[in-house]
């Protein structure tokens, strides 16, 4: 018995050590790049083998906002991404409600087909769309970039709200109808209200998918329309590393902020539940 207990304690200690090492490695891989960017965004110069930066400055931040190309890219991203999210909501939320509340023929095939379409590399799809864009004169246009980014949000704005709508108890809606509430009032005060956490997660994920989309936006938007991710191609080649660090932090800030604000619903399972077909 003593030997068994000793083995259990040893095994438990080994598991704890493994978890601590794993967490430390994850922290290095996740926080390490952010730390590196944060340091280089404020240094005058820092090159190997110097252990310390040559100095500290805010010059690179002013340079980013004084550069007309970079300022335009920031403005385009902050304008295009909210538009993409709103259009995605208008198109996908009715489909999500139907998928979550109605059991029509081909429902699961529709959802699985939508998910399968997003499991392949998109560059081939973007190249095919580009040929269509040439025929429709959408290359290098604001509308063309909105449409190409919209494709990446459909999966989030359909699957996650569909699961949220499906999770709303029907007996609550029936009780409200029996009490004399209209269909619209039942939907507004019960169905939509209970499904709102899932819709919020879908909005956050759709915004991030749009804000970070680079391949399609570059293929159909350049050289007239540049967003922050597509401008990174030029930054890496033509700007000092400190400018790229500042721009990368600006690009990462909306993602960190939105995920932090929505962390309760994401950690609470809304995101995972959104990819379950019932």
Image (tube, rainbow, N blue to C red):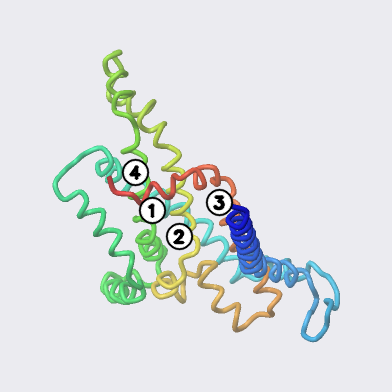
- Asked if marks 4 and 2 touch (Cβ < 8 Å), the reply is no
Give me the residue at 56% from left, 79% from top: 234
Q: Secondary structure at mark 2?
A: helix
In three-dimensional space, the C-alpha distance between marks 4 and 1, rounded to whole angstroms, equals: 11 Å
Please give left or right for residue 140 compared with residue 249 in the image.
left
Residue 249 appears in view: no
Eyeballing the image, is 239 above or below 211? below
Q: Secondary structure at mark 3?
A: helix
Q: Quadrant of the C terminus?
A: top left
Q: Which residue is mark 4?
A: 163
Single out the residue that lies furthest toward the left: 105
Q: Secondary structure at mark 4?
A: helix
In three-dimensional space, the C-alpha distance between marks 4 and 2, rounded to whole angstroms, equals: 19 Å
Label drawn at residue 166? none
Give me the residue at 32% from left, 76% from top: 124
Q: Which residue is mark 2?
A: 209
x, y (%) of residue 24? 66, 64
In three-dimensional space, the C-alpha distance between marks 3 and 1, rounded to whole angstroms, equals: 15 Å
Please give left or right for residue 223 compared with residue 162 in the image.
right
Q: Residues within 10 Å of mark 1 (few under 14, many from 20)?
A: many
Label drawn at residue 156? 1
Q: Residues within 10 Å of mark 2 (few under 14, many from 20)?
A: many
x, y (%) of residue 157? 37, 50
Q: Which residue is mark 3?
A: 259
């Amino acid at each position: 018995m003593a030997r068994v207990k000793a083995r259990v304690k040893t095994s438990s200690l080994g598991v704890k050590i493994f978890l601590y090492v794993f967490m430390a490695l994850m922290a290095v891989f996740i926080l390490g790049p952010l730390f590196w960017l944060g340091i280089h965004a404020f240094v005058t110069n820092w090159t190997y083998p110097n252990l310390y930066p040559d100095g500290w400055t805010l010059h690179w931040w002013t340079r980013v906002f004084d550069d007309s190309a970079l300022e335009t890219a920031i403005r385009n991203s902050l304008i295009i991404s909210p538009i993409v999210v709103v259009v995605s909501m208008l198109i996908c939320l009715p489909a999500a409600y139907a998928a979550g509340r109605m059991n029509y023929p081909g429902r699961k095939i529709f959802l699985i087909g939508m998910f399968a379409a997003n499991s392949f590399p998109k560059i081939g799809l973007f190249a095919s769309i580009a040929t269509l864009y040439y025929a429709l004169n959408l290359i290098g246009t604001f509308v063309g970039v909105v449409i190409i980014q919209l494709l990446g949000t459909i999966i989030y704005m359909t699957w996650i709200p569909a699961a949220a709508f499906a999770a709303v108890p029907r007996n609550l809606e029936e009780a409200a109808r029996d009490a004399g509430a209209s269909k619209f009032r039942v939907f507004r005060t019960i169905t939509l209200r209970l499904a709102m956490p899932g819709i919020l997660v879908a909005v956050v994920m759709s915004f991030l998918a749009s804000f970070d989309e680079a391949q399609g936006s570059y293929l159909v938007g350049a050289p007239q329309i540049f967003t922050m991710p597509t401008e990174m191609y030029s930054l890496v080649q033509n700007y000092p590393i400190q400018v790229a660090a500042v721009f990368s932090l600006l690009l990462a800030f909306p993602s960190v902020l939105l995920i932090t604000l929505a962390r309760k619903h994401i950690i609470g399972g809304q995101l995972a539940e959104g990819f379950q077909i019932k």
